[in-house]
Amino acid sequence: MTSSELKNRLTSGRLSKEKITVLVEELQDQPKLVKVILDVIWFEDKEGTFNASWVFDHLMRKKLDYLLPFITDFSQGLEGLQSESCIRPMAHVCELIAIARYKNKDIKYINGISSQNLEQIVSACFDWLIGSRKVAAKVFAMTSLRYLGAEFKWIHPELKPILENSINSGTAGYKFRAKKTLEELKKLE
C-alpha cells in the first residue's frame, strides 16, 4: 500500500469496525506507514474526524514497536489535540507505552524513548486528566502517569491529590480506576 492509498482509505468516509480490522491487518507488514497515519491524525483532529486515530490505536495494540521510529512525532503532536475522538485512542497508546516501559521493562522502550518524549507524554496526560475530557481519556492518562511516576518522582505527589479530589465526582469507571491507582500509589510510598 502506498502513502496516498492509505490516506485515501483513511479519509474517504467513516470506517466500520470490520474495515478497521482489515486495514490494520494490511498495515502490520508496513511499519513505515505509521508516519502517514500520524500525519492524518493531526489533520483529522482539526476536521473533527477520527478514522486514523482508531486505526492507529488498533495497530499499536498489535505492533507497538512500529511507533518507536516516530515517537517524537507522536509525543509532539499530543499537546495540540482537541477532538475527544482522537484523544481517547492516543491516550490509550500512551498507556501502552507506559506499560511496555515501566511494567514490562521492555528494553526497546527504555532505550528508544527520550526524556523529552516522556515529558511531552506526561504533560498531555496531566492535561487530559485535569481537563474536561471524557472518562476513557482520563483513565488512560491516570494509568500512564502512575507508571511514568517511577521515573519522574514529582508525578505521584501531584497525581494523588488530583485523584483524591476528583474521585467522588467521577463516573463509576473513573472511581474504580482512581481507587485502584490510589491504592497502588500508597503501596509505593
Image (cartoon, rainbow, N blue to C red):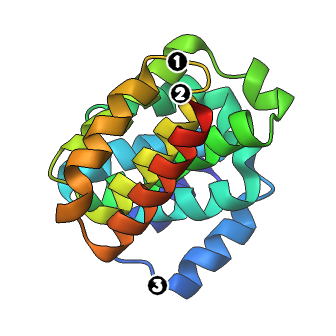
Query: Residue 163: image x %, image y %?
Result: 31, 46
**Position of 120 compared to 45: left or right?**
right
User: Residue under circle 3?
Assistant: 16
Secondary structure under tag 3 reads loop
Spatial distance from mark 2 to mark 3, Cα to Cα?
Answer: 37 Å
**Image height of 173 relative to 128, above or below:** below
Q: Residue at x 73, y 41 (%)?
A: 103
Secondary structure under tag 2 reads loop
Q: Residues within 10 Å of mark 2 (few under 14, many from 20)?
A: many
Residue 149 is tagged as: 2
**Image height of 96 relative to 157, above or below:** below
Spatial distance from mark 3 to mark 1, Cα to Cα?
Answer: 39 Å
Q: Amino acid at mark 1?
A: Phe
Toward the right, the furthest residue is: 107
Q: Amino acid at mark 3?
A: Ser
C-beta proximity under 8 Å, tags 1 and 2? yes
The answer to whether residue 83 is visible is no
Tag in front: 3 or 1:
1
Q: Residue at x 17, y 63 (%)?
A: 169
Q: How many marks?
A: 3
User: Residue under circle 1?
Assistant: 152
**Image quadrant in which the C terminus is located:** top right
**Image height of 162 relative to 21, above or below:** above
Q: Residue at x 73, y 66 (%)?
A: 26
Q: Earlier in the sequence, mark 2 or mark 3?
A: 3
Q: Earlier in the sequence, mark 3 or mark 1?
A: 3
Query: Residue 134: image x %, image y %?
Result: 25, 62
**Position of 144 compared to 42: left or right?**
right
**Image quadrant in which the N terminus is located:** bottom right
Q: Residue at x 43, y 40 (%)?
A: 39
